[in-house]
């Protein structure tokens, strides 16, 4: 049977592949600790779930809504973004989507003609590259000359006449790195000069640790704001990964084009989930802070454990998100594996610890560990990794 070239060229999600394998092993009764996927281990706060139940009971969840979301949810997003960034987006500048992933996918679809390029800093989230390809575009990876952050010089080296957009993810997946206001200002002004749209993926904006601060690209300067599309959602901050509510906020022309696409692709996001998201955005933030503090505690406990493992190198503690992205090439060598991919596969097979090889994020000497798991499991996982390295390094 014939398949389209655009899908044949797309690689499956490496994080989902590892996670699915871990789930299969668990189903067979194996002792698995899954650190592969970026999913908070907390249940959605009760008040959010109750809002969805109320919408169902009242009948409000029974019907279609506008493709880009109900007015009340747009109003809640508008107020939330204004409080965080100081930018006031009107209803026609906001599109609610079935998860932030669809916001990105839809954005690439309306931005790119065949052969046009998107700059993607390395390391970067696995789906950026494949979503650009699915839109007919060309992903152009940008190696970092610093510690997991690109500079204007790095971007300039990869920019061509075909470059249309740049993705900036801060706090970042897979590193937890945060761009400073000064760094974002330089990058935002560079993009303006080159007529390159900035895509600010701020999905981890609320997960900041040990005094780190967050600045959004959209909050720096009005001209940069006009040249930026903000992407965010409720999955990470509110433990709502399964609810699938994200949004894009930006220039009305771009959001209008996304609305047209969404009208034909998905229609509205699930109505009950939209009412749940209103409760999340309208809340006082206490549940977000409780989860943030728990992630911070986990980071502070496991970071020193990880850096003591022979062959694991991560000189700087992450500032946000909930990932560690150490260089483990030396650990692979010590344990007689020819690649980090083989090391990671053996680790899962022999210890039941699931992590993601860094090749998926554009840096094959690294591996990603999520600490969105219970603290006892995290400690046990690092002990298993340490024991695995010690047992095989001879």
Image: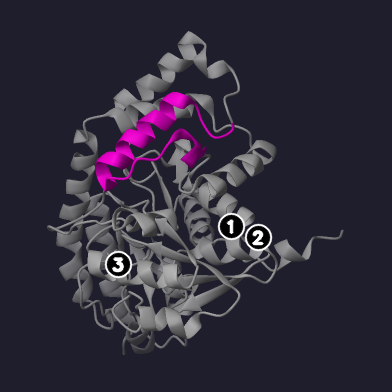
Q: Is-magenta flag for residue 264? A: no
- Name the spot of residue 166 as percent of width and height, x first: 47, 67
Figure label count:
3
- Name the spot of residue 84 as percent of width and height, x first: 26, 44
| Prevailing secondary structure of the magenta residues | helix
Mark 1 or mark 2: which comes first in sequence? 1
Q: In this view, does 339 lie above or below 376?
A: below
Q: Name the residue under label 2.
A: 135
Viewer-nearest residue: 323 or 4 = 4
Mark 3 packing: few (<14 Cα in 10 Å), some, or many (20+)? some
Contact between labelled residues 2 and 3, with CB atoms less than 8 Å apart: no
Q: Classify residue 206 as left or right of residue 343.
A: left
Q: Classify residue 270 as left or right of residue 347.
A: right
Q: Classify residue 333 as left or right of residue 158.
A: left
Q: What element carries label 3?
A: helix
Q: How far is the residue under mark 1 from the one under mark 2?
A: 6 Å
Q: How far is the residue under mark 3 from the one under mark 2?
A: 28 Å
Contact between labelled residues 3 and 1, with CB atoms less than 8 Å apart: no
Mark 1 packing: few (<14 Cα in 10 Å), some, or many (20+)? many
* Disc sitting over residue 31 in the figure: none
- Quarter of the figure that contains the C terminus: bottom left
- Name the residue: 30% across, 67% down: 185
Q: Nearer the viewer, mark 3 or mark 2?
A: 3
Q: Classify residue 210 as left or right of residue 376.
A: left
Q: Mark 3 points at which residue?
A: 185
The range drawn in magenta is: 67-96
Q: Mark 1 points at which residue?
A: 108
């Amino acid at each position: 049977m014939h398949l389209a070239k655009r899908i044949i060229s797309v690689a499956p999600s490496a994080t989902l592949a590892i996670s699915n394998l871990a789930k299969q092993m668990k189903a067979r009764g194996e002792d698995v600790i899954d650190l592969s996927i970026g999913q908070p281990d907390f249940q959605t706060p009760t008040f959010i779930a109750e809002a969805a139940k109320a919408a169902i009971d009242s009948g409000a969840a029974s019907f279609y809504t506008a493709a880009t979301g109900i007015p009340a949810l747009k109003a809640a997003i508008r107020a939330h973004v204004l409080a965080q960034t100081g930018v006031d987006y009107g209803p026609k500048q906001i599109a609610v989507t079935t998860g932030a992933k669809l916001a990105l996918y839809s954005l690439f679809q309306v931005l790119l003609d065949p052969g046009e390029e998107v700059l993607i800093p390395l390391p970067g989230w696995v789906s950026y590259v494949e979503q650009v390809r699915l839109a007919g575009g060309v992903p152009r990876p940008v190696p970092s000359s610093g510690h997991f952050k690109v500079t204007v010089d790095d971007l300039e080296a990869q920019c061509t006449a075909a470059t249309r957009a740049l993705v900036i993810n801060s706090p970042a997946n897979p590193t937890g790195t945060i761009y400073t206001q000064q760094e974002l200002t330089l990058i935002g002004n560079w993009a303006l000069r080159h007529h390159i749209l900035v895509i600010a993926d701020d999905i981890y904006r609320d997960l900041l640790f040990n005094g780190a601060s967050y600045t959004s690209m959209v909050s720096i300067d009005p001209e940069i704001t006009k040249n930026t599309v903000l992407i965010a959602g409720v999955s990470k901050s509110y433990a709502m990964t399964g609810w699938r509510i994200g949004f894009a906020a930006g220039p009305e022309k771009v959001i209008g084009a996304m609305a047209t696409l969404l009208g034909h692709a998905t229609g509205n996001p699930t109505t009950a989930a939209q009412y749940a998201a209103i409760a999340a955005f309208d809340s006082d933030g206490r549940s977000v802070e409780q989860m943030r503090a728990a992630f911070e505690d986990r980071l502070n406990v496991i970071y020193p454990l990880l850096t003591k493992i022979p062959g694991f190198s991560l000189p700087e503690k992450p500032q946000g998100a909930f990932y560690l992205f150490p260089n483990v090439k030396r650990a692979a060598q010590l344990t007689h594996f020819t690649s980090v991919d083989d090391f990671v596969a053996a680790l899962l097979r022999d210890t039941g610890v699931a992590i993601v090889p860094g090749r998926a994020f554009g840096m094959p000497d690294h591996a990603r560990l999520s600490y969105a798991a219970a603290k006892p499991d995290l400690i046990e996982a690092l002990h298993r990794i340490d024991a695995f390295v010690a047992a095989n390094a001879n």
